[in-house]
Image (spheres, rainbow, N blue to C red):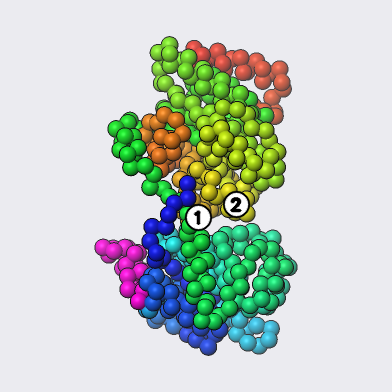
C-alpha cells in the first residue's frame, strides 16, 4: 500500500561532480541556486561536492567522524541545513584532468567512494539528486551507494563516447537506478533519450526551476509505501510467540528440484522453522501437498508443527519472476508482469518479488518494478543463491528508498539449504497478519556454501540417472516419514 507523505519537507543531498571551488562552472552555479532556494523553503539540503582544498576535505571528514560518537548521529549534519543555508560537505580531494579540447574536464575524486558509501548509508535522506552522473565522478559514485530516491539532472548536450558507445549497456543499467530524470535543455533531453531511452522532464534553469524540481520530489515521494501498518493489529500480534520463517523454497514439483514434500517438511522441522512458503516454479501442487501433509502431521500430534504458506514462483513473459503468497489456484506462466500481479491480487494473495536485480538470471529490474510498485507487498532483500552480493545490496537499497516491506528466503532446491536465511517474526494467521508481522521482523543469515548447495542440486537433478533418482527419492521419503530428517 502506498501511504501519505509524512512531512511537507524533505532531506535532500545534491551531488555535483565538479570541485566546489569552480563557482564559474554552470552546473555548480545551478546546484548552488537550486539548493539555496529549496533550503529557504524549509527543506534540509546538503551539497556533496569534491574539493581542491585538502584542508576543506579534512575538516569535512573530521565532521563526519564526529557524528559517529555525537548524540545526534549523522542526522546532525542536516540540522540548520534549511532556512536558505544549505550545508556543503567536501567529500574528497580531486585532480582536474585536461580534456581533448584543452579545457579541464570533470574532476576525478580521490578516495571518495568510501566516504560516500558511509555517508549515504547513515544519512536519513529522502532524495539524492545527482548532476551529470557519468562515471567516473562523485555523482556516479553517489548513485551507486544511495539508499534514497534518486533524481538525475543532465545539463550539457555533449556526446560522451565512453558512455554512449563503449560502455552503453553498463551505463544504461546504471542509470536504471534513477527514479526520475531531468534535462536542463531540450537538446540535452533529445540526446539522452536517443542513447538511454526514458522520460526526461525538461526543467530550464530559470526562476520556475525550483517549483518544477519540488514537484518531481513530491510525485516520487507519493510512491513510497506506508509501513506503519495497523497499530491495533500490531498490538494483538505482540502477544503472539516468535517463530522462524523461510519464504522461498522448492519441492520436486518444480522442474529443477528433486526434494520430495515429505523431505522438505522434515528438514524444516529439523531446522526449527515455524512456517515456510513453498514456492515451486510455475506450479502450486507441491505447496498444496505440503500444507495438507503438515496439517495431517499436526493433527496426529507430530513434533514441530509447521505452518505452510501456499505460493508459486511465476515466470512472466519477459519481465522476470514474481511470487504469489497465500494463493489457492495455479497461475499460468507467460503472462505479463502486470497480469500476473493482478491474478495474485484477485486471489487475495500477496505480491512478493524474489531475487530482484540478480542480472545473472531473468529477474525483475528497475524498469519492471516501477510500474507495479503500488501492488508490491514485500521484496526479497537477501537470497543466499545470488552469486554476486551487490545484487542483494541493491535490493536492500531499493526496499529502503520505496519503504517496501523486506523479506528473505533460502530459495532452497535441496533440503540442506533450508533455513540458511530466516525471518524471526510473530506468529500469524492469514495474509493480513503475516504482512503486519513481517513489517516488524528481523532477518538473520548464517554462512552457507553456494558451491556446496549448487553441487548437490546438480547431483540430484542432472548427474544422477532417472532410475537412481527414483530409488533415492523412495529412501529419503521413508526416512523422513519415520522422523529421521531426510536431508541426505
Q: Identify the residue at horizontal 51%, vertical 61% (top origin).
A: 219
Q: Is residue 431 visible?
A: yes
Q: Is residue 361 magenta?
A: no
Q: CA distance from mark 2 to mark 1?
A: 11 Å
Give the answer, above or below, for where 162 lies relative to 148. below
Instruction: Answer yes or no: is residue 362 visible.
Output: no
Q: Position of residue 18 (x, y in %)?
A: 53, 79
Residue displayed at 61% across by 14% down = 474
Q: What kind of element bears circle 2?
A: helix
Count of numbered tags:
2
Point out which mark residue 371 bears: 2
Q: Position of residue 397 (x, y in %)?
A: 49, 54
Q: Which residues are magenta?
A: 63-83
Which residue: 48% across, 14% down? 296
Residue 370: where, in percent of width, then height? Answer: 58, 53
For label 2, the crowd category at 10 Å Cα-Cα, with few meaning under 14, some 14 to 19 and many 20 or more, is few
Q: Locate the C terminus by quadrant.
A: top right
Q: Is residue 408 above or below residue 71?
A: above
Amino acid at each position: 500500500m502506498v501511504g501519505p507523505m509524512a512531512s511537507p519537507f524533505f532531506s535532500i543531498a545534491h551531488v555535483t561532480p565538479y570541485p566546489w571551488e569552480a563557482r564559474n562552472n554552470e552546473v555548480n552555479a545551478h546546484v548552488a541556486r537550486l539548493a539555496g532556494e529549496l533550503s529557504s523553503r524549509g527543506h534540509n539540503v546538503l551539497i556533496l561536492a569534491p574539493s581542491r582544498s585538502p584542508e576543506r576535505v579534512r575538516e569535512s571528514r573530521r565532521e563526519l567522524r564526529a557524528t559517529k560518537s555525537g548524540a545526534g548521529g549523522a542526522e546532525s549534519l542536516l540540522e540548520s541545513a534549511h532556512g536558505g543555508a544549505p550545508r556543503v560537505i567536501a567529500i574528497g580531494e580531486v585532480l582536474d584532468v585536461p580534456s581533448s579540447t584543452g579545457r579541464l574536464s570533470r574532476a576525478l575524486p580521490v578516495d571518495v567512494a568510501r566516504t560516500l558509501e558511509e555517508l549515504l548509508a547513515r544519512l536519513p535522506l529522502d532524495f539524492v539528486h545527482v548532476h551529470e552522473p557519468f562515471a567516473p565522478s562523485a555523482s556516479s559514485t553517489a548513485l551507486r551507494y544511495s539508499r534514497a530516491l534518486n533524481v538525475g539532472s543532465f545539463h550539457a548536450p555533449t556526446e560522451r563516447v565512453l558512455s554512449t558507445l563503449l560502455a552503453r549497456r553498463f551505463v544504461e543499467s546504471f542509470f536504471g537506478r534513477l527514479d526520475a530524470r531531468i534535462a536542463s535543455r531540450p537538446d540535452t533531453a533529445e540526446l539522452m533519450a536517443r542513447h538511454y531511452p526514458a522520460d526526461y522532464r525538461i526543467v530550464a534553469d530559470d526562476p520556475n526551476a525550483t517549483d518544477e524540481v519540488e514537484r518531481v520530489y513530491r510525485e516520487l515521494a507519493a510512491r513510497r509505501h506506508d509501513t506503519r501498518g495497523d497499530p491495533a493489529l500490531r498490538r494483538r500480534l505482540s502477544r503472539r510467540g516468535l517463530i522462524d520463517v523461510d519464504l522461498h523454497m522448492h519441492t520436486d514439483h518444480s522442474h529443477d528440484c528433486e526434494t520430495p514434500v515429505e523431505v522438505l517438511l522434515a528438514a524444516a522441522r529439523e531446522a526449527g522453522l515455524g512456517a515456510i512458503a513453498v514456492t515451486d516454479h510455475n506450479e502450486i501442487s507441491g505447496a498444496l501437498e505440503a500444507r495438507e501433509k503438515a496439517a495431517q502431521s499436526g493433527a496426529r500430534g507430530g513434533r514441530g508443527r509447521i505452518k505452510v504458506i501456499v505460493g508459486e514462483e511465476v515466470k512472466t513473459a519477459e519481465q522476470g519472476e514474481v511470487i504469489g503468497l497465500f494463493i489457492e489456484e495455479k497461475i499460468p506462466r507467460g503472462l505479463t508482469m502486470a497480469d500476473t500481479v493482478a491474478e495474485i491480487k484477485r486471489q487475495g494473495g500477496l505480491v512478493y518479488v524474489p531475487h530482484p536485480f540478480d542480472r545473472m538470471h531473468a529477474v525483475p529490474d528497475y524498469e519492471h518494478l516501477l510500474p507495479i510498485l503500488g501492488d508490491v507487498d514485500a521484496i526479497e532483500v537477501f537470497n543466499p543463491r545470488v552469486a554476486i552480493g551487490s545484487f542483494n545490496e541493491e535490493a536492500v537499497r531499493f526496499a529502503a528508498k520505496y519503504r517496501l516491506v523486506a523479506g528473505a528466503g533460502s530459495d532452497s532446491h535441496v533440503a540442506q539449504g533450508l533455513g540458511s536465511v530466516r525471518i524471526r517474526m510473530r506468529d500469524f494467521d492469514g495474509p493480513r497478519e503475516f504482512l503486519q508481522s513481517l513489517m516488524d521482523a528481523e532477518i538473520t543469515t548464517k554462512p552457507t556454501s553456494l558451491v556446496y548447495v549448487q553441487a548437490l542440486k546438480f547431483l540430484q537433478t542432472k548427474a544422477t540417472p532417472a532410475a537412481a533418482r527414483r530409488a533415492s527419492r523412495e529412501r529419503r521419503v521413508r526416512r523422513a516419514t519415520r522422523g529421521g530428517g531426510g536431508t541426505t
